[in-house]
């Protein structure tokens, strides 16, 4: 009855949490997915799925319009992963596959990775899959080195999967691929592994989102990342829950001063960052025109509420300044109109000075 009511509505997602999915129940689900093409997302979260029920789902995937399939914590083993890998190639509409929390094993992982070469999956989430040390990193590195642009994968999440030293090999294999988002956090990497990985990412102009939360990063590792940032096109950087201090914070702010791609930075819960570091870094961040969000709180006990509020106000001010610049530049681009003196006066003095560094004198005047 629930499935029929969902199918008759305008919903696009069917989710089941913490229930037993028998073969008969799965048949109802599959039949509904096949008849109602508006249902594009199926989520089974912490469900007990029988082997026959899982086979029903896999064998009928090709007849559905699923774009997202989330099978999280359903105790999917290597054998089940092999069956799934053989069938996702037939579901050309599938774009997201989430297998979080399943003990896939090396055999299951290799099967899923091999299937990526012949399917259209763009987002793959593998978190808490209990892989052996370095296995996941090496398998994906081998895949990327061999196929590069032939793989449609865009977003890869390998958090909490014992990537270890294979992170260096994985980072080096990303150049030339379509991967623009990499999440490999929540793991205690050594400083040497992080430094070598950042050096391997130099010159990678495809990667725009790098997530490294809770990865044991300190200021020396961050310095290596700062050296790589000018040679990349990063837009989002997540370094929350690490061991960064004021020294690393200021170094990052200095690096971003002349960076025109970065839009969001997350440094939350780095308890070594204090008010003194914010005072030194904030003037540098205020000169960054593309930065939309720079978060350092509110859960950090080393920062005062006043300083966190000051950072938030600065980001809001930057957003306002970008709007003013857009208004001014749009008026300058119109052949029949000239920017008025009132529009020029809208720009803060420090922002005007910033613009004068890359505009010729006649443009500034």
Image (cartoon, grey):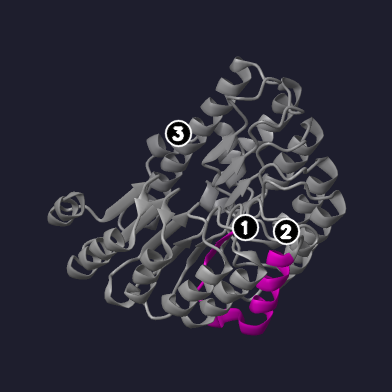
Residue 202 visible (yes or no):
no
Q: Where residue 336 appears, x then y in whole percent?
A: 30, 57
Labelled pair 2, 3 in contact (Cβ < 8 Å) = no
Residue on which the image places disc 3 = 345
Q: Quadrant of residue 229?
A: bottom right
**Nearer the observer, 261 or 90:** 90
Which residue range is magenta in the image?
Answer: 135-157
Count the marks: how many? 3
Is 203 displayed left or right of 25 in the figure? Answer: right
CA distance for labels 2 and 3: 53 Å
CA distance for labels 3 and 1: 49 Å
In the rendered view, tell whether residue 7 sits above or below residue 239: below
Labelled pair 1, 2 in contact (Cβ < 8 Å) = yes
Q: Earlier in the sequence, mark 3 or mark 1?
A: 1
In the rendered view, tell whether residue 212 sits above or below residue 53: above
Q: Where residue 199 appears, x then y in whole percent?
A: 80, 62
Residue 158, numbered circle = 1
Assign a secondary structure to mark 1.
loop
Residue 163, numbered circle = 2
Q: Would residue 155 be counted in the magenta stretch? A: yes
Q: Counting other residues with Cα less than 10 Å from the Cα at mark 2, is it few (<14), some (14-19), or many (20 or more)?
A: many
Callout in the foreground (3, 1): 1
Residue 180, numbered circle = none
Q: Earlier in the sequence, mark 1 or mark 2?
A: 1
Q: Counting other residues with Cα less than 10 Å from the Cα at mark 1, is it few (<14), some (14-19), or many (20 or more)?
A: many
CA distance for labels 1 and 2: 8 Å
């Amino acid at each position: 009855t629930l499935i029929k009511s969902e199918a008759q509505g305008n919903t696009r997602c069917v989710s089941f949490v913490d229930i037993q999915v028998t073969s008969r129940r799965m048949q109802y689900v599959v039949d509904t997915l096949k008849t109602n093409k508006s249902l594009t997302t199926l989520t089974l979260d912490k469900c007990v799925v029988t082997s026959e029920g899982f086979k029903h789902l896999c064998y009928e995937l090709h007849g559905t319009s699923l774009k997202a399939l989330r099978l999280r914590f359903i105790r999917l083993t290597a054998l089940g992963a092999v069956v799934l890998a053989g069938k996702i190639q037939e579901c050309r509409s599938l774009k997201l596959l989430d297998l979080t929390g399943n003990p896939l094993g090396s055999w299951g992982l290799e099967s899923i990775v091999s299937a990526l070469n012949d399917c259209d999956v763009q987002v793959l989430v593998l978190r808490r899959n209990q892989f052996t040390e370095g296995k996941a990193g090496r398998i994906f590195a081998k895949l990327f080195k061999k196929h590069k642009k032939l793989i449609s994968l865009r977003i890869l999440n390998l958090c909490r999967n014992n990537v270890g030293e294979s992170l260096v090999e994985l980072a080096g294999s990303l150049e030339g691929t379509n991967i623009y988002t990499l999440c490999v956090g929540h793991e205690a990497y050594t400083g040497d592994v992080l430094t070598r990985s950042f050096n391997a990412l130099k010159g990678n102009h495809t990667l725009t989102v790098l997530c490294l939360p809770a990865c044991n990063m300190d200021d020396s590792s961050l310095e290596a990342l700062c050296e790589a940032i000018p040679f990349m096109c990063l837009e989002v950087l997540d370094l929350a829950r690490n061991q960064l201090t004021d020294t690393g914070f200021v170094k990052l702010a200095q690096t971003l001063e002349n960076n025109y791609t970065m839009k969001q930075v997350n440094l939350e819960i780095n308890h070594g960052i204090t008010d003194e570091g914010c005072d030194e870094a904030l003037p540098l961040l205020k000169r960054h025109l593309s930065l939309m969000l720079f978060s350092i709180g509110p859960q950090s006990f080393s920062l005062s509420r006043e300083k966190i509020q000051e950072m938030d106000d600065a980001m809001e001010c930057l957003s306002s300044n970008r709007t003013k610049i857009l208004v001014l530049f749009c008026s300058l681009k119109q052949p029949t109109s000239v920017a008025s003196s009132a529009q020029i006066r809208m720009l803060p003095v420090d922002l005007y000075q910033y613009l004068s560094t890359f505009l010729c004198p006649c443009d500034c005047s």
